[in-house]
Image (cartoon, rainbow, N blue to C red):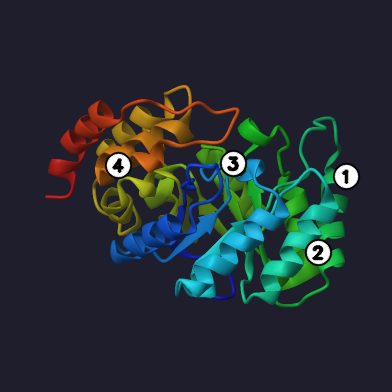
């Protein structure tokens, strides 16, 4: 598990305390609950975890708390993408020092006119700046959110330049042809998918597994996809129920609050707004889940 992220990983939601800080106790409990459902690891501060709303210090403090709570470092990945390359370097160095190896790296975002060469330069600057052979980075491709795609040539070039330090790539484009293009260009990369309905076909096509958000609320259904069970239709319906809302993050948290009876899960960081009630969504999910996991 240490060389690359493989299998069933969850892009974890981030619970908040009343003052808006990360609720470390609730997060560790959530991770352990997911592990009991067959999850291999959790990625913190990705898109589902509102990652861009947290600074370097907050992310490092959260990792320290997770380790203190008994979560093994090899079961934790962390979102390490920032507009400032120096922040990516600082976070990556810090978590490597704590025993983690898996860091998901977005290309620096905001400037959407950059060239493939510029994107490769940015990733190279992070890896060179970290200068630590323990790093097992996964490039994070989610252009519909970040605004900056990772060209297949960049993924392939970085793997050739840095070997196992560039261990994988998470494709959250939702376009299976894009996954296939990454596989063709860089077959040595462990490529995971974020789009849950694609999980089974991606694994069958040589993919490494998934890092996905829906597993926060329907881990059994996602596990069925990973195991190759015939649950694509309910998985698609469940994903549509959440993704086709104004805020995937707020919706996931509202459902978590309804599932756990813990209203603390409703809290989100600005500029997101919390949903008042996830009970109706939970009932719809329960109806989808019942025949799929029977």
Residue drawn at (51%, 41%) of the image: 176
- Return the x and y of residue 203 as percentages of the image width and height: 43, 57
Residue drawn at (30%, 46%) of the image: 218
Q: Could you tell which of marks 1 and 4 lies nearer the N-terminus?
A: 1
Toward the front, the furthest residue is 19
Gap in Å between the C-alphas at discs 1 and 3? 21 Å
Marks 1 and 2 close (CB-CB < 8 Å): no
- Return the x and y of residue 261 as percentages of the image width and height: 25, 43
Q: Could you tell which of marks 3 and 2 lies nearer the N-terminus?
A: 2
Q: Which disc, if any, is residue 232? A: 4
262 vs 147, left or right, is left
Q: Is residue 35 visible?
A: yes
Secondary-structure class at tag 2: helix
Q: Which residue is mark 2?
A: 127
Marks 4 and 3 close (CB-CB < 8 Å): no
Q: Which residue is mark 1?
A: 118
Q: Could you tell which of marks 4 and 2 lies nearer the N-terminus?
A: 2
For the image, the number of numbered tags is: 4
Gap in Å between the C-alphas at discs 1 and 4? 38 Å
């Amino acid at each position: 598990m240490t060389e690359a992220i493989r299998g069933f990983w969850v892009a974890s939601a981030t619970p908040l305390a009343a003052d808006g800080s990360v609720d470390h106790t609730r997060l560790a409990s959530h991770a352990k609950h997911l592990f009991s459902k067959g999850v291999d690891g959790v990625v913190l501060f990705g898109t589902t975890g509102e990652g861009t709303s947290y600074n370097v210090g907050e992310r490092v403090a959260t990792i320290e708390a997770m380790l203190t709570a008994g979560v093994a470092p090899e079961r934790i990945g962390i979102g390490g993408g920032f507009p400032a390359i120096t922040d990516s370097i600082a976070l990556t160095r810090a978590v490597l020092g704590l025993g983690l190896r898996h860091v998901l790296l977005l290309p620096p975002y905001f400037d959407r006119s950059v060239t493939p060469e510029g994107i490769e330069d940015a990733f190279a600057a992070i890896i060179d700046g970290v200068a630590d052979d323990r790093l097992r980075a996964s490039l994070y491709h989610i252009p519909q959110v970040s605004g900056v795609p990772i060209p297949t040539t960049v993924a392939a070039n970085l793997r050739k330049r840095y070997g196992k330090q560039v261990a994988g790539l998470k494709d959250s484009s939702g376009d299976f042809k894009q996954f296939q293009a990454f596989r063709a260009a860089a077959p040595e990369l462990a490529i995971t998918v974020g789009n849950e309905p694609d999980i089974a076909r991606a694994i069958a096509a040589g993919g490494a597994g998934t890092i996905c958000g829906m597993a926060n609320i329907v881990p059994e259904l996602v596990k069925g996809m990973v195991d190759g069970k015939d649950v694509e239709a309910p998985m698609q319906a469940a994903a549509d129920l959440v993704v086709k809302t104004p805020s995937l993050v707020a919706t996931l948290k509202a459902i978590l609050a309804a599932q756990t009876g813990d209203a603390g899960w409703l809290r989100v960081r600005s500029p997101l707004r919390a949903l008042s009630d996830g009970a109706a969504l939970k009932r719809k999910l329960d109806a989808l889940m019942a025949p799929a996991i029977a």
